[in-house]
Structures are given as C-alpha cells and as structure tokens.
Amino acid sequence: MASRYDRAITVFSPDGHLFQVEYAIEAVKRGSSAVGVRGKNSVILGVERRATAKLQDPRTIKKICKIDEHVTLAFAGLTADARVLVNKARLECQSYRLTYEDAPTVEYVARYIARTQQKYTQRGGVRPFGVSCVIAGTNPDGSAVLYQTDPAGTYSAWKATAVGGRNSSNMQEYLEKQWADDLEEENAIRLTVKTLLEVVDSGAKNMEVAVITQGRPMRMLDEATLAALSASIEAEQEEAKKKASAGSGESKES
Amino acid sequence: MASRYDRAITVFSPDGHLFQVEYAIEAVKRGSSAVGVRGKNSVILGVERRATAKLQDPRTIKKICKIDEHVTLAFAGLTADARVLVNKARLECQSYRLTYEDAPTVEYVARYIARTQQKYTQRGGVRPFGVSCVIAGTNPDGSAVLYQTDPAGTYSAWKATAVGGRNSSNMQEYLEKQWADDLEEENAIRLTVKTLLEVVDSGAKNMEVAVITQGRPMRMLDEATLAALSASIEAEQEEAKKKASAGSGESKES
Amino acid sequence: MASRYDRAITVFSPDGHLFQVEYAIEAVKRGSSAVGVRGKNSVILGVERRATAKLQDPRTIKKICKIDEHVTLAFAGLTADARVLVNKARLECQSYRLTYEDAPTVEYVARYIARTQQKYTQRGGVRPFGVSCVIAGTNPDGSAVLYQTDPAGTYSAWKATAVGGRNSSNMQEYLEKQWADDLEEENAIRLTVKTLLEVVDSGAKNMEVAVITQGRPMRMLDEATLAALSASIEAEQEEAKKKASAGSGESKES
Amino acid sequence: MASRYDRAITVFSPDGHLFQVEYAIEAVKRGSSAVGVRGKNSVILGVERRATAKLQDPRTIKKICKIDEHVTLAFAGLTADARVLVNKARLECQSYRLTYEDAPTVEYVARYIARTQQKYTQRGGVRPFGVSCVIAGTNPDGSAVLYQTDPAGTYSAWKATAVGGRNSSNMQEYLEKQWADDLEEENAIRLTVKTLLEVVDSGAKNMEVAVITQGRPMRMLDEATLAALSASIEAEQEEAKKKASAGSGESKES
Amino acid sequence: MASRYDRAITVFSPDGHLFQVEYAIEAVKRGSSAVGVRGKNSVILGVERRATAKLQDPRTIKKICKIDEHVTLAFAGLTADARVLVNKARLECQSYRLTYEDAPTVEYVARYIARTQQKYTQRGGVRPFGVSCVIAGTNPDGSAVLYQTDPAGTYSAWKATAVGGRNSSNMQEYLEKQWADDLEEENAIRLTVKTLLEVVDSGAKNMEVAVITQGRPMRMLDEATLAALSASIEAEQEEAKKKASAGSGESKES
Amino acid sequence: MASRYDRAITVFSPDGHLFQVEYAIEAVKRGSSAVGVRGKNSVILGVERRATAKLQDPRTIKKICKIDEHVTLAFAGLTADARVLVNKARLECQSYRLTYEDAPTVEYVARYIARTQQKYTQRGGVRPFGVSCVIAGTNPDGSAVLYQTDPAGTYSAWKATAVGGRNSSNMQEYLEKQWADDLEEENAIRLTVKTLLEVVDSGAKNMEVAVITQGRPMRMLDEATLAALSASIEAEQEEAKKKASAGSGESKES
Amino acid sequence: MASRYDRAITVFSPDGHLFQVEYAIEAVKRGSSAVGVRGKNSVILGVERRATAKLQDPRTIKKICKIDEHVTLAFAGLTADARVLVNKARLECQSYRLTYEDAPTVEYVARYIARTQQKYTQRGGVRPFGVSCVIAGTNPDGSAVLYQTDPAGTYSAWKATAVGGRNSSNMQEYLEKQWADDLEEENAIRLTVKTLLEVVDSGAKNMEVAVITQGRPMRMLDEATLAALSASIEAEQEEAKKKASAGSGESKES
C-alpha cells in the first residue's frame, strides 16, 4: 500500500508520512550504534564498530569525527552519507570562524547539520541522508553539551542518547536507568562503554570511544584502555550475576 | 482512488482537491498541539510537548521560537520543516529592518510565512510544508495580535486558536466556550494552560508557554510556575466535578 | 477514464479537455461565492464569507483586496493561490506606474491576471491557479467596469456576475432577472446583497461588500450597514411571499 | 490503445501520430467557428460568438484581434491560449518594425505564429496550443491575403476558409460552392455572414465581423449592420426555399 | 510489447531499436511523397501535393523550399517540423557565408540538417523530427548533387530517390528501372514527373517540380508546363499499353 | 522481466547490468561489420557496406572517416550517432593541436571517444551511443596502432578486430586463426578483405577498405583494386576447396 | 518486490536499502578481481585479467592506473566507469599540487574518490559508479598504505584486501590466513600472485601486478617475472599437496 508514495521525490502519503524519511531511518537502524553521555565537565561519545574485517585498518572506518576544535560527531547509518555531512559541517565551521572571528557554538553546528538533512527531504531530485548524528562539544562557558540529529532533519539536546542499530531503544532504556547528574569523566566513560557492551559482542576491539573535555583537545581512548575497562565491567557484571543468583531479590545492575 | 493524484507534484484531483496539501495537513494532525490566546495587552502561546524522552533536554525541542523582537511563533507538525520556515521568517525580518529601518508588522510576518508555504504547493519538485503556525506579537500601537497559517499557505487572524494534534477541534471548541474579551494576562495564561490540559496527560512538564506583552521582551514560563498553575487548575476542576456530582445541574466548567 | 490525462503537467485529453484546468474550476466551485454588480457610476463587489470560526478575526480572511487605487478584486477558490495573484497584480500596477507615469486601466489589470493564470496551464512543473477573480474599478473617464477571470486564464467584461460555490449559476440567473441599466449606487449594493443572500444563510455577518465609485477611494460596508440592509431585504421578501400566497399569480421577486 | 502515447511530452505513437497535437485539434473543434473570406481589395473575418451570457459584455470576448496596423487575427479554440499567441505576435511585429523600419508582411506574421505553435509540439514540459488562427491582412502592393494556422504549427494561404467548431467542414463546403474570384467587399461580407449563419442560431448578435481593406484601418461591423444583413440574408433564403418548394429542380442557393 | 520503450525520451528497446525514430519514420510514410532525380548538369525535385482543399492557395503549402542560392530542399512528413529544419538550415547558410565569405557545399547543408535531426533522437525532452528531406543543389564545379536525410539523422547521396508516402518503395523501384547516367534536363524532368504520376491521381495540379541547374537560379515549373508534360506522358503510356496488349512480350515501359 | 530497468535513464538492474548499454550493443549487432588489421608499418580498416540501394551514391554512406591527419575511424552501428562522435573527435583533435601545437596520439583520440560514449551511459536525459568504433592510426615513432570502443565507453588496443553485425565473433575467430606478426601491407589488406568476405555476399562492391601507413596520407582502395583482390581470394579459396576435397586432411585455409 | 525502488534516482526502499547502490555492487561482482597487499616498505596491487581476446593488446585494458607519482589505483567493475574516476582523481591531484605546492596524501586521494562515488548515489539524474577501487601509495614518511572504495562511496584502509569477482570473499579469507606483518617486498608480491591464482586459471598471462615502493617509481612486473613466479608457486603447491597426501595432518599452505 505504501508503494506509491515513495518514488521520485519525498512526498506525503495520505496519512501524513514522509516515507523516504522513514526508510532512511530504517537505514540508520540497519547500521551500527552510537552513544553519547554527558558528564559534569565532559561528554563521551562511543560507537559500535561492527564487522571489521580481519585485515581492515580500523582507523579509516572511524565513526567518530572531529568537526572543529571543540565539536566532535559520532554517526550511525550510511558511512558515505555521513562523510558528506561531516565535510559540510567542517566547511561551515571554517566559514563561520572567518566571518565572525569566533568559533560557532555546538548548537549552531547541530542546527546546521539538521538543516542540511531537512533540505534533502523537501527538494526533488535528491534523497534524504541515511544518517543520525550524535554531536558533542564544549561551549566557551565550560559546559559540555550533547545533540542528536535524524534523517528528518530534527535536532535535539540530550543528557545521554543512543542512536542506530536494532537495539538503540534498549540502549536508551539502559541509559535512562544508569545516567545520573554530574557524572565524573571516569564514570561517564564507564557508562558509555557499558551501554555499548549491550550490543557489542567481542568487547573492546569493536568499539571506539572519544572523550571531550572543556579546555582540552578531544582524545580517543586506545584499545588497551578500552580492554581494561571492558574486563573490569565484565568482572563487575559477573560478580553482580553471582550475587543475583545467590540472592535473587537484588538488582541486576548495582 | 486518490492514489493517482498525489505523485510528483501537487496537482488537482478531479473534485478540486490538492491531495499533497491535505496529506501535509494530516502530518500536522499527527504532531502535537499549539494554542494561542489573545488577551487585552498580551497574547499567550502554548504548545504540547509530546513524548519527551527521559534524558532529552527539553530546551532544544522548543516548539515556540522568537522570530523578531516583537513576533513569536508556535508550530504544530514536522519540526524540521518548521525550522526552515522559522529561519526564513527571521531572515525576512532582518532584511525588512535593513530596507525600511523599521520593524515589520506581525501581519507582514504571518503573510510572509503563508506565502512561503503556498509556493511549495504550486511548484514542481517540492512538497508542501507539513506545518501549521500560530504567530503572536504586538504592534507599535500596543495591540496584541494572533495569526495562524496552514500547509495550504492560508493565513488568518484569531482571538484564540488551537492547531495540530488529533484533538485540535475539541480544543478549539473549549476555547470558544471559555474565551472572553479583554482577558487580563493572568487569565489568558490560565486559559492557555487549561486548553493544553485537555490533551496533555502529565501536566506542566509536557508543555511550553510563552507570554508576549506589549513593550516587554517575550518570556517563557518556567516549570515551577506551570506546575503551580496546573495544580491550581486541577484543584479547581476537582472542585467543579464535586460540585457537579453534588448538583448535576451546574455547568462543568465554571 | 480521465485518470491518465491529469498527471505531471496539464496535457490534453483525447477529446480536447485540459483536465487540470477543469479540476481547478472544481476547486473554485468548492469555495465560496463572489458577486460583482456594475451600476451607473459605481461597481459593487460582494463575497460570501463561509464558515468563519467563532474566534476567527474576519478581517484577515478578506476575499476582497485592493489592487491599486482604482482597482479592487474579489475572488472565489483557494485563498492562498488568490493571494499570489493579488501580490503579482499589485507589483505589476506599481511597475506600470513607474514605467508609464500613469495608472493602468482596469482591463489591463484583468488581462494581466488572466495571462498569469494561463501560463500556469501550459508550462510543466506547475499547476493552474484554483481561483476565479471578479475585478472591479473605474476608468479615467469615470466609467465603472467589471471583469472576471477563470483558472483557464480567460477574462471577460460583465454587467453583473457571480462566480464560485455550488450555486453560482443560480446566482447568475438571479442577476440576469434583476439587473438593470444605470443602477444607482444604492440599488447596486442592494442587488449585490440580495444575490449573496441566495447562498448565505446567516445574513450580514457572513458577507463582505465593497463599493467602488469614480473619484472616491474604495470602501467596505460595515457590519451594521449590512445588517440593516439584510433586515430590510428580508422584510421585503417576507412581504413579497405574503403577497404571493395571497395572490399566487404575482411574480415572486418584484 | 492510444493511452500510452499522450503523456508528459508530445511523442509519436507507433503509427506516426502526435496525439497531443490531435487532442489540441479536438479542443479547437470544441470551440466556436471562425471564417475568413478573401475579396478583390479586402478580406473579411467572421467569428461565431457562442453562448454569451446575458450580462456579459461581448467586447472582451472578442475573438478577432488586431495584431498590427495591417494584420488582423480571428481564432477558434481556447481563448486564453489564443491571447498568448496574439501577444507574442504583437511583440514580434513591434520588434520587426524596430529592426527593419518596415512592417512585416502578413505571411511573415502567419509564419511566426505557426512556428511558435510548432515549438510547443516538440519540446518537453509544454503542451501544444489549443488554437487555430485565421489571419487576414493587406500587403504593400494592395493585395488582401488570408492565412490559417493549426495546433501542429502548419500555416497555409486560402481564398476562403472556416476553422473550429463541429461543423467547420460543412462551412468549408459551403464556402467552396459560394466563393468566387474578385468579390467586391460587400459580397465578401455577405458571404462571410451567410457562412456563419450555417452554425449561428440567433443571428447577428452572436457573431463578430471585421473588414480589412487596403489603405484603411480595420473596422468591426456594428450590430445594427449585422442585423440588417442577417435579416436580408434570411429573407433571401426564405425566398429561395419557396422557389425551391415551388420548383424543386432549382438550386437551393442561387 | 513495444509499449514501454517509447516514452519520455528516445531510448533503446531490448533488440536495439529506437522506437521514437521508427514512429517518426511512420509519420513520414503518412505524409506525401518527394522525388529527386540527378541529371547531367541539373537536378530535379518533385513533390506530391496531396489533398489541397479547393480554396487553399497552393503556394503556401510548398513542400519545396530554397535554402540558399544553390541549395533547394523538398520534404516528406510533418510540414510544421520541416519548416523548423528549413529555418535552421537557412540560418546556418547565412552564418557560414558570414564566417567563411563563401557558400557552403550542398553536402555541408545536408550534413547540417542530418546532424540537427540526430540531436533530437538522443536528448531527453524532445522528440525526433517527423521529416525526411531530399536536398538538391549545384557545387562550384558545376556538378549537380542530390542528398537525402531521415528522422534518424542519417544522410546519403543519391542518383535518384523517392521518400515519403505509402508507395515510396514502388517509386524507388521505378526510378531504378528508369534512371540513366547523364540525363539531359528535359529527360530528368520527365522522369521526375513520371515517378510522381505513380502516386499522384489527378495529374499536374497535385505536384510541384523544381529545376536546379548550375549557374542559374532555381525555378519552379508552372502548372501549364506540368499539365503539358503530364498529358504527353499519359499519351505515351496509353500508347505503350496498346502496344503491350498488341504484343504482350514487350516491356511495359519503353 | 527486464522491462522495468530500461526507462528514462540508464540505471542498474538487480544483477548489475546496464540494460540501455546492452540494448545499444544490440543496435551495433543490427548494423554492418567493421574490421581492423594491424600490419608491420600499416593498419588496415575495412567495412561491410550493407544494402546500398541501386541509385545510392556509396560515397556518402562511408563508414570510414578521417578524424585527423594520422587517425582514421571505422564504425559499426547507427550511422547518425557515429557522425556525432566523428564530429566531436575531429573538434577535439583541432583543439588539441591549438593547445599543444602537436598532434594527439591515436590512443588519446580513442580514449576521448570512449570517454564521450561513457558519459552518455551515466547521465540522465540521454541514451548511450549505438556505435562501436575501430580506430586506426600511426604514432610519431612510425608504429601503426589499432583501437576499439563500444557503447559502454570502454576502449582497448588490438592486433586485429571485428565489430558489428550478427557474425562479428565468427570474423574475430577467423582473424585469430589468420593474423600473424609483422604482416606486410599487402598481406594485411588481403586479410582484411578475406575477413570481410566472410559476411559480404556480393564481393568488392559492398565493402570499403582504407590503408593507413606511416608517413603517408590515408588512402581508400578503389573498386577495381578491391574487385581484383576479391577475385584472387575467391580463386584461391576455390583452389583450396578442391585440394581439400582431394586430400581432406589438409587445412582449409593455407 | 524490489522492482519499484530502483527507478529514476537512487531512493530508499522500505527496509532502508539503496537498491541502485546494491545493484552497482553486483556489477562489481560481475567484473574481475583486484588484490592489494601491504608490505613493510611497499604495497603490491594485482588484478585478474579476465577473458582477453587472443588478438587484444593487453596494455590498454590495464586495470592498474597511476593516479599521481606516489598513488596507484586498481579497480574491479565497469572499466568505462573506472576511467572516469581515474581521470577525476588525476585532475584533483594536479589541482592539489598547484594549490598547495605539495602532493596530496594517499588517504586524501582515496577520500576524494569515495566522495565522488557517494555523490552519484544521492543526486537525481545519475546512477552510481559500478566500480570498487584498491588504492595504493606511499606517504612522505615512507609508509606504504592501502585503501579501498566501493559504489556506496565508503573508503577504508586495509592491510590486504581483495575486491570484485564472484570469489572475492574466498580471496579475502585466503589473505587473512596468509598475510603477516612486515612482509618483505618479495613476499608481498608472492602473496599477491598466490591470491590471484585462486581465481585466475591460465596463470601469469591473465594477471597484472604493480609494485609500489617508497622513493621509487611504481613498476609493473613483466610477463616473464610473473610466469617464473607462477611456476614457482605451482611447484610449491604441488609439493605441498604431495606432502599433504603423504602426511595428511600437515597444513595445506606452509
């Protein structure tokens, strides 16, 4: 029944849907997951690195990209589409700095990316971007902020969010249970990795994690750090399980 | 039967409908509601904030946007589409000020937005905007005015209006019963919140309310104020119900 | 059977129809009615104001618009489309005045609007305007003139005409019976209102009437005047009915 | 079977037809008729004025238009389309005069109109003009000439011709029987009116007749003249019928 | 089965056909015939003038057009399309003369026309020309040459050729039997007329014949000359038939 | 099943085909054959001249065209399409000479033609060229080279190749058996003609052969030479057959 | 079921696929294979040369192309499409050198090619490139790097990779078993050839191998070298087989 409303350009269906946008969201679901967690002075981005071939150099399939000194983006969905958005955002930041002799705010960047995504849902001759973005950064006042965009071109701010993949809603629920105000950087990182471990099978190797802290350059966690973290988390969870089986009335995740 | 008339561009059906416009109106109905109430010296805008995720920062999903010093817009429908209209309207206001060294009237802004929406219903290669707007502002003479636009590109002035969502006509009926001339600001706010409570389940958290008064900057009501208002209104309604069940001949809403 | 000929662009059907144009005429029929009556020194425009919501400000849904000092337009059909034509016509008048240092004739304006409407029936990528216009004005020689355009882009001059709505042909027949040469302004107004009352249920509230007289600015009749007129007409008709039932051989409208 | 060949642009059908052109010709047949008769020093154009509403001002639905001082055009088919051709032809004449400081020949104008009509049969994104033209004028050598164009963009010269309407071939047959060389102006007018009376029911009121004579401005016959002519012709025909019924071997039209 | 390959633009069918081109060739077959015969110092063009209405001026439906001083073109197919090609070719010749201060060769003109026709078979948004041309002319060395183009945009040189109409292949076979090297002008004309008489019923009236001789302007044969020729040919054929019935072993055309 | 993938523009089918390209290759198969044979200091091009009408001047249906002093092209497929490629290649060579003051290499020309053909397989609004080219020439170092292009836009170098027509693969097999290194010009010509005689019925008349030798202008073999060659080859083959029937163990072609 | 989502432009299917991209990947699978192997100071590219006709000059069907001094590209898929990418990349390198007076990094080139491929998946009026590229080069720091792009426009870095053809995943598995860190050039070449021999039947003739070493120009291995290598590898494998059949517990490839 939907078959007639998804051709040529993005048009409305009789019940007010934009099918091409919804199919692009489906493309995001087919991709891997991205997680963002806002802490007190920092914000953490983490992505699932799905199905890296044995001989592939994981560096170039990075799903976490620096947009500007103070803005970093993680994405879920079509990699090639995402790179187009990343390029456009980088150019916009440079152009902004040239015009205003100042850095754009993180929200400005998120809004710019969302606006670009919207354009591709309304004009003929193009298709929407099959990408959701999680955008993290720090503002001049030191606050760490976290935004999200989707194929419809909407953007919104979050304390913690998970997008992409078949289980993003489970991940979001997990974040809702675990997130707390004023997380120290260490705890924010731990929460990010724990959330990714909900969907990542083979541990530290299949994830990338970036730490954005006010006043410092963005840094990627190296594999050793991630491996140690994963091991620690798995030990903790093992412990928790034992406790749980010993006394099944206790909560699964303490 | 409608299936052939909604492709490619917005064309007429044999009975004179523009289906893409009607489907865009359907998209507005699928969104959340927006309410506008004109008082004596002020005009109030209120929107339903539907389904905010627990960790979402409600500030960025604002459905009430300042267009110019004296013009504020609330929208129902597709958020990403609305932002395009908001951006266009802001640019038009700036351009108007540069050209005429004066602010545009509120009606000018409403007309501009409506004209923009109409364009997208007549040209090929684009689809209509899936947005209805409620535009509030004050004119130089101190009068508070309220306009509304729809996906067809029509605009009109209102004393009070409700757009968007499945129950906007119930809300409109409620406004028709409750609205009175020369409402004081306090009462106009109260009426706005009462109207929103017709569709908002979980009270003050899920609404935004903006107050536009002549000679003052637009201000958003904070959550505490809204919570107090909601509590007061619910107490009043409880009271009313009791009275009603005590003496069922009295009116439900006094 | 018509289904294949109304897509994409306005093309001919095997029997020589332009379906998109005929469907646009259908859109005019779905709208409310507009009436024009030419008198000796004046011309009257009247429109039905259908289904104004209780809280709507009737001023902004005006279906009578001033185009230039001496030209006024009433329309039937899609309001948003009509505003596009009105804007284009206003700009053309200004541009004419700048170029020729003189006002365009009323016929020039009617021809311009019709030509604009025709363009949208022949080019790809657009649809026809869903609007019929009744254009009234006075020429430098003092004569009052009345024109009409339709979605096909035809224009024509009339002594009196009714367009739009399901009953425009009944209204036209009524005008044919009632119109006379050299109507004084008062009588022309009366005839306009009587014609509108053929389709308007709730009287003076649901109509707008404009009076265009040579050498004077166009003026809209206020509600009080219209109410008084309606009352007078209804009384007259009541009287006529009584006479008719008393002596059924007399004519219904004397 | 024809259904697939008439979409989007004017393409060939398997048997070499251009359907959109043939449907445009059908639109000409749905319109009223136009007649042209070439005399010794003059050429006469006549058109059927079909279904003028009682209150319509017949002047603006003129189907005979002056193109240049020495060129006049009558059309059959879609009025709004015809006006586009008329405007284009007028501009071309002005432009020709500016460039060559001389008037274009009548054939030049006919060729220009035909070429314009052809363009709309070969390019995508447009439809053919639903118009056939009869173009009359006088050349510098004093000769009166008569041309015809059709929706395919063909033009041709004629001694006398009838286009448009369901009975144009009957009218053409009538002209073939009645036309003679070197008709004096009076007789050419008489033949034009007689031909129109083959399809016009209500006589002089429903026709327009223009007389183009070398060295004189084109003039339209007024209604009185036409009424007198019609009366005279009808009397003659009545007479002829009587004779015919008296002696049925005589020719119907002497 | 062919139905899917002939839409919108000229595309290939699975077996390598360009259907729109083949349908355009069909349009040429629906038209009248054109014949070209090359003699020693001259080349003759002849066309069938099909179905001229009684009152039509045969001059304007000329299917033989002068392109330049030394190049003449006869066409078969859609008249309006042909005029477009003729205009383009004339302009090209003028432009060539301006650029090179010399006349283009006849082959240059034929190639130009063919190239133009090809373009309309490969680009989207247009249809092929429904025209085949026979192009005759004399080169500076005095030689008379004859070319032919078709809707595919191919051109080729011929000693004698017949295109257009349902019987062009019979005419071509006739030419093959009758043509000889170094035909004197008189004999080339005679052969042209004889070939046309294969398809033309009513003799000299329904044909046009042009004579192109080196060093002389192109001239059209007048009707009297053609009538005399036809009569002579018919007499000859009558004679031949008699002989044939007398002695049936002799050849039909001696 | 293929029916859906061949419309409008050249798109991929689910199994990775470009149908419009394959159908264009089919158009090449429907054409006549072209052969190229590289010798020691020369390269020979030969084409089948299929179905020349009796009165057609074979010169203008030349399927062997000079592109530049040192580059010659033979084609198979649609003649009108090929001429477009030939024109483009000629212009490119002139432009190259102007820019670099040197002649382009033969490979440059082949690459240019192939690139042009590719463009028409990837852009919307056009169709591929229905042409395969065999391009021969000599480089400044005296070497004779031979290239081939196809409708997909691929080019490749060959020692000897046959394209076009239903039997090109048989011809290619024949070349594979007969071709040898360092063929003297005479033998290369002989091989070219022998290969063409595999498909050409009526001998020397229905072929064109061009000889490209280093340091000499390209020359076409005249009919007499070709006839002598054909006769000699046929005699040889007759001889071979006799021997073969005498001693059936010997090779058919010695 | 997929039939509706692959027309006109590359749009999303309901489950989030871009069919035209997936069909282009299918076109890559229909092509021959390309292999890249990164060694310590060098990187090796190898391609399968499928189905070279006996008389074809293998040089022009090179599937390994130099892009810049330090960047070489091997491709799998449509040859004509690949050449377009190669040309664009070469121009980009030249333009980069002009602008920055420095060579672009290998990653820059890979990113540029991928971005170009992405563009053709999102815009209307074009189709994706049916090509996967393996891009090898050396950076200023002496490191040898290897990248890969696909029709979706994704790029990634690899230690060793195989693309194109029906068995690319088998080849990739083989590489995964055999590849080791810090391969000396000789061993990297040997591994490349061994991997190609998995799909190439007739040995050294049907492959091309390029060696890219830091500080030296790229060089192609000649046929003799490749033949020696193939022979050596086959001998080794024969040996291995014997050993395997003698003692079946040993590994097949030591």
Image (tube, coloured by chain):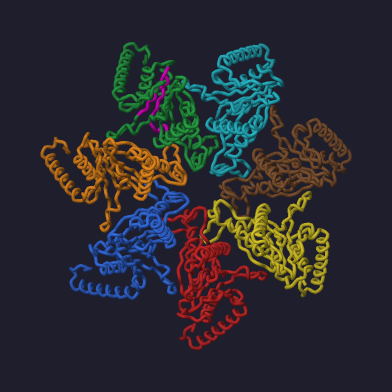
Chain colours: A cyan, B brown, C yellow, D red, E blue, F orange, G green
Q: Quadrant of residue F24?
A: top left
Residue G105 seen from this side? yes
* Horizontal and vertical percent position of residue D176: 46, 76
Q: Position of residue C178 (x, y in %)?
A: 73, 70
In the depicted view, which residue is nearer to us: A240 or B70?
Answer: B70
Query: Which sits in the foreground, D254 or G85?
Result: G85
Based on the displayed image, in which of its 4 quarters is residue C219 positioned? bottom right
Query: Residues in magenta?
Result: G28-48
- Across and down, in percent, residue E77 comes to 39, 61
The quadrant the N terminus of chain A occupies is: top right
Quarter residue C180 falls in: bottom right
Query: Is B187 situated left or right of D120 in this image?
Result: right
Above or below, G89 against F36 in this view is above
Residue at horizontal 52 percent and vertical 25 percent from the top: A61
Outermost residue, left side:
F246
Task: Indicate the quadrant containing the C terminus of chain A: top left, top right, bottom left or bottom right.
Answer: top right
- Where residue C128 appears, as percent x and y from the top left, is 60, 55
C211, above or below B209, in the image? below
Q: How many marks?
A: 0
- Report if residue B108 lies within the magenta region: no
Q: In the depicted view, which residue is nearer to us: B150 or A2?
A: B150
